[in-house]
Image: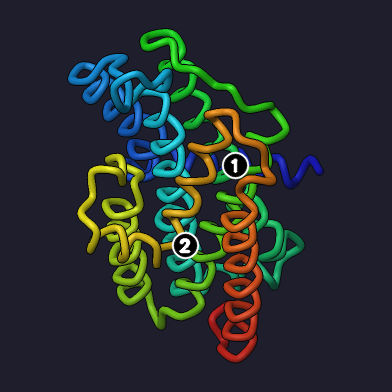
């Protein structure tokens, strides 16, 4: 355990030194909240509604954070280590590659939760956002969203032949889902064609789940979202594991 904690500290330093991961996990979502908060403030999502734009923005930006770590930071870290044969060399030492990979996953998970916590705290202090969901329901929705996005990143790493191809996959799918899933702007503003495209994107269901649970919905009302995210996780992990087993990348 002591050895594993040392590895985690090392991976945490590497995460903080990576400007992209650090900025877009801990800083950028809060800046987005401040920007749109300055524009809309506590304006209701529609006339007479008791839910404001900031109330639905915080859970949506939380999914943005999950997307950064799950689809960008973690898979690109895995891809770099894979391409440079770092895992193969570590596998010949007492440390082993499993400890390094576990530490990388744990650090990205912790930083994701910190980023979401900062977002919620800022939203509470500045815009008095309403969080009507129970702690258990919110925890489940966050967990399902994280596992689904992380599993997609794992699959992209397994599919990509090298760092460039993995980069391409991650950037392509992340930015498509970022702008069309409702993670950056409410999907109620989308035209019908964009809504149809959004319904094909996994991140859309994470956003819908998080917004619904934060608004006080029970988990039973979001069975479809939970099923899709759960099925996505199983499919991505299964296919990714098979691909990793067939190629000498680690």
Image mark for residue 142 = 1
> Residue 221: x percent and y percent?
63, 45
User: Which dot, 1 or 2, sits closer to the camera?
Assistant: 1
The colour scheme applied to this rendered structure is: rainbow
How many numbered markers are drawn? Answer: 2
x, y percentage for residue 218?
66, 37
SS class, disc 2: helix
In the displayed orientation, state which residue is furthest to the right: 1
Q: What element carries label 1?
A: helix
Lower sequence index among marks 1 and 2: 2
User: Residue at point 42% right, 61% down?
Assistant: 76
At horizontal 58% and vertical 77% (from top left) the residue drawn is 240
The disc placed on residue 51 is: none
Circle 1 packing at 10 Å, graded few (<14), some (14-19), many (20+), is: many
* Residue 22 in the image: above or below residue 195: above
Residue position marked by numbered label 2 in the rendering: 75
In the rendered structure, are the residues bearing label 1 and label 2 in contact, judged by CB atoms less than 8 Å apart? Answer: no
In the rendered image, the vertical position of residue 166 relative to residue 12, given as above or below: below
Q: Nearer the viewer, residue 108 or 11?
A: 108
> Which of 217 and 136 lies nearest the eye of the viewer?
217
Asked if residue 213 is positioned above or below residue 68 in the image, the reply reads: above
Measured as percent of width and height from the top left, residue 34 is found at 27, 20
Gap in angstroms between the C-alphas marked 1 and 2: 19 Å
List the single residue furthest toward the bottom: 246
Residue at 41% of width from left, 83% of height from top?
161
Q: Where is residue 188 in the image (x, y as percent from the top left)?
A: 29, 43
Taking depth in this image into account, of 78 and 218 the one nearest to the observer is 218
Considering the image in quadrants, where does the N terminus appear? Answer: top right
Quadrant, the C terminus:
bottom right
Q: Is residue 193 above or below residue 182?
A: below
């Amino acid at each position: 355990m002591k050895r594993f904690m040392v590895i985690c500290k090392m991976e945490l330093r590497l995460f903080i030194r990576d400007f992209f991961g650090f900025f877009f996990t801990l800083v950028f979502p809060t800046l987005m909240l401040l920007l749109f908060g300055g524009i809309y403030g506590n304006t209701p999502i529609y006339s007479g509604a008791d839910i404001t734009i900031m109330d639905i923005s915080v859970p949506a930006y939380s999914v943005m954070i999950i997307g950064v770590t799950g689809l960008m930071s973690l898979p690109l870290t895995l891809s770099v280590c894979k391409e440079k044969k770092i895992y193969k060399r570590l596998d010949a030492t007492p440390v082993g590659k499993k400890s390094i990979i576990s530490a990388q996953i744990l650090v990205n998970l912790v930083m994701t939760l910190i980023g979401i916590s900062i977002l919620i705290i800022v939203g509470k202090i500045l815009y008095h956002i309403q969080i009507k969901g129970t702690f258990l329901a919110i925890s489940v929705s966050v967990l399902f969203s994280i596992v689904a996005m992380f599993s997609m990143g794992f699959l992209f790493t397994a599919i990509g032949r090298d760092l460039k191809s993995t980069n391409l996959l991650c950037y392509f799918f992340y930015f498509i889902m970022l702008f069309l899933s409702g993670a950056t702007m409410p999907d109620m503003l989308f035209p019908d064609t964009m809504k149809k495209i959004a319904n094909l994107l996994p991140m859309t269901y994470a956003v819908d789940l998080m917004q619904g649970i934060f608004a006080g919905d029970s988990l039973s009302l979001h069975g479809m979202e939970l099923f899709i995210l759960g099925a996505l996780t199983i499919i991505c992990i299964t296919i990714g594991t098979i691909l990793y087993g067939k190629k000498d990348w680690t």
